[in-house]
Amino acid sequence: MTKLAPPRRKTADSSPTVSMGFVTGILSGVGRAGLSPADLLEHAEIASDLLHRREARIPVARYAALYRLINDSLDDEGFALFSRPLRRGSFEFLCRAVLSAPTLELALERIARFLHVVLDDLSVEIETSGRAAVIVISEEQAPPVGAAGRVFAYEWLLRMIHGLAAWLVAHPLPLDEVAFPYPPPLHVADYELVFAPRHTFDAPRLEARFPVEWLALPVRRDEAALTLFLADAPASITTLYRRDRALALRVREHLRAALPEQLTLPTLARRMFLSPRTLHRRLEDEGTSFRAIKDSLRRELAVDWLTKTARPLGRIGADLGFADAAAFYRAFAAWTGCGPREFRQRHRLTGTPQTLPD
């Protein structure tokens, strides 16, 4: 078993935070490689008992530390999730293979061919459908890990491809929609900020859509830029929250911390030392809006509390900042197609997150 370095001195952690569902996923394959998940968590300064708490979250800095620790401890940049290890240096070779591509389209095609050589479990293709370009990830054979590991394998591979693509063209590439080939995971509430505001589940394959015009974007990076990039990659582009969604994440956490108070856009803009117009524009650049973030947060919390707690309906509505029970009922019916009481009766026995209409 690979020896771990002594834990670093503790430092003060701050938001943003990461759902423990991502932590469970990244640890899913390490036992196959002879590493102890408990030891890894300890050295990353993450309490192991948090794995058993569905609503637990940890600072992004601690998750990034765990990511790097696993990469440093394994000769496998794929976290032992796949049938064959991705030996250290695989990501660098991938970057060098695509750096000379003239456009994003050719870069993505080279990424797909490279992954075909090194991965047996998942395959990648680039398709076009009308005005959309689609990153397709299909399963050739099930990864040799459990359900949480399979979910994380898809999550990680999509983030890696998408993050590398955005770096190559030096431009944010917010995805329009992603369909995932598995049921909603426990950390589904984070998907809006990690992937896209619109996401569905139980699809036959993973499909991530973005405007087809972006395929013509030129690759702008050179060898000098790659040297700097590799000093912190791939962790820098796959530790969940992308830079093109950074402001949306901060807005979401401000709104959640203020509940049951309902912050207005001007009030939040002042707290963030921005003008309302700037906040609106920057959220629009990230492919979202203040209203969309607010509605998504309240929707996900409502579903979570209805299916996993015995909290009374009136209390849920009040805790989410609704003026009265009728306002909560109308909003929830608009989100899901049924009232909160009926939704609880349908889904509470399973206690699992549900796919909601956009």
Image (spheres, rainbow, N blue to C red):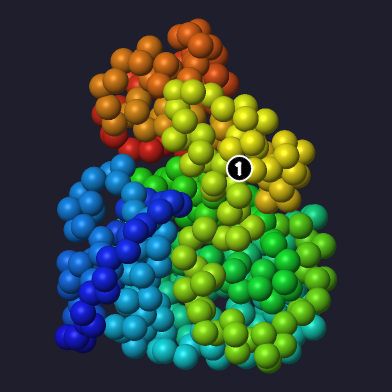
Q: Is residue 109 above or below residue 311?
A: below
Residue identifier under label 1 = 272
Does residue 333 appear in this view? no
Is 353 displayed left or right of 40 in the figure? right
Task: Give the image location of residue 250, x and y in percent.
Answer: 54, 46
Residue at horizontal 79 percent and vertical 83 percent from the top: 102
Task: Give the image location of residue 197, x and y in percent.
Answer: 60, 45
Task: Give the image location of residue 83, x and y in percent.
Answer: 35, 79
Judged from the image, the secondary structure of the residue bearing numbered disc 1 is: loop
**Viewer-side residue, 316 vs 61:** 61
Crowd tier of the residue under label 1, counting other residues whose Cα lies within 10 Å: few below 14, some 14–19, many 20 or above: some
**Viewer-side residue, 223 vs 191:** 223
Residue at horizontal 36 percent and vertical 57 percent from the top: 13
Residue at horizontal 40 percent and vertical 67 percent from the top: 64
For the N terminus, the quadrant is bottom left
Is 299 displayed left or right of 265 in the figure? left
As shown in the figure, which amino acid type bears the numbered disc 1? Met
Residue at horizontal 57 percent and vertical 27 percent from the top: 263
Task: Give the image location of residue 82, x and y in percent.
Answer: 37, 76
For the C terminus, the quadrant is top right
